[in-house]
Amino acid sequence: MKVAVFGSSVDPGFIPVLQKFFHFFKSRKIKVSLYKPFYLFLTNDLGYTPYCTGFFHSHTDFDTGTNFIFSVGGDGTFLESVQCIQNYEIPIVGVNSGRLGFLADISQEEVIGALTNIAENKFHVIERTMIQVELSGGSALDYNYALNEATVLKSDTSSMISIKAYINGEILNNFWADGLIIATPTGSTAYSLSVGGPILTPGSENFVITPIAPHNLTVRPIVVPDDNELVLKVAGRGTHFLASLDSRSVSVEFSTSVKVKKAGSKLKTIVLDGHSFYGTLRNKLLWGIDKRN
């Protein structure tokens, strides 16, 4: 078996968990390819030298024969691992070193049990829809895919922007707002949720379009099929707006239109036996919790 481990930084208190984590692989002679910047952080900043049999720096030198990718950190690190590795056929496992961890849902206490279950094939794979974004006029994005959401935002703290949204060539609405989110089912529990969007289950074949601070009481989020193609045309008092994919943003001129559609590939993630989406909603987002019961 070959595994890859991606991370950015962890707190010193997480070192005992990492020691057990890497010892599991070493004791079973499992090959480990470690993200080199993460290795340097652990050795130089925390004084811990983890077990590994090789390194990778990006998708260009990543071993496509890897069986699993472990993302160590929080949900932000999980999203970074998708961008860095850019291989959607290899399942990603999220190990949570922080607090919430919705995508990185394996807790510190569960690490060894989770690794054992994965080694014994006691898990199932969920394929998650991704978004692909194209900018008109030759504007380029280093990586034009997102797992959570694509967002257009005003680029300053003053005036709102106007966003004309077209769906399959038909005008959907002209949103006067601070921005507009197009979220996948995975992203429906992220930024979109925090501004009033609905929760979609991971297998839903839909996008949710959620305005950010709309200047209209009748504008509400809308759920649309994910085989629809959206085009966004943005205007405002300034010259630029922000186009954001997950945690990455680029400043774009108002003359640029944004095309959003479902990506041709889905991202594979691992869910351990005994874990479920609804359980995660209740346990981590406290969904439906009522102290009267």
Image: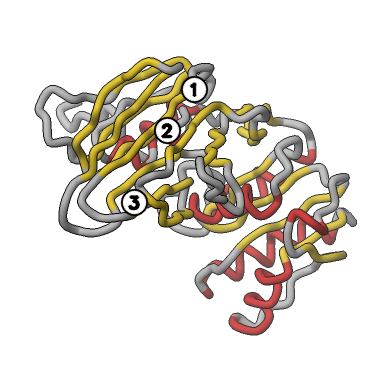
What residue is shown with label 2? Answer: 183
Horizontal side of residue 173 vs 54, given as left or right: left
Q: Nearer the viewer, residue 231 or 227?
A: 231
Q: Disc 2 marks which amino acid?
A: Ala
Name the residue rendered at 46%, 19% in the picture: 206
* Residue toward you, 245 or 97: 245
> Residue 229 got which mark?
1
Of residue 48 and residue 60, the one placed in the foreground of this image is 60
* Inter-mark Cα distance, 3 to 1: 21 Å
Residues at marks 2 and 3 touching, judged by CB atoms closer than 8 Å = no
Q: CA distance from mark 2 to mark 3?
A: 19 Å
Three-letter amino acid code at the position of disc 1? Glu
Query: Which residue is pictured at 75% across the width and 35% down the height?
Result: 89
Report how many numbered discs are placed on residues in the image.
3
Reading the chain from its start, which is encountered first: label 2 or label 3?
A: 2
- Residue 241: which disc? 3
Residue 28: % across, % down: 86, 54
Q: Is residue 261 above or below residue 26?
A: above
Task: Report the residue at 48% width, 54% height from top.
Answer: 248
How far, Cα to Cα, is label 2 from label 1?
13 Å
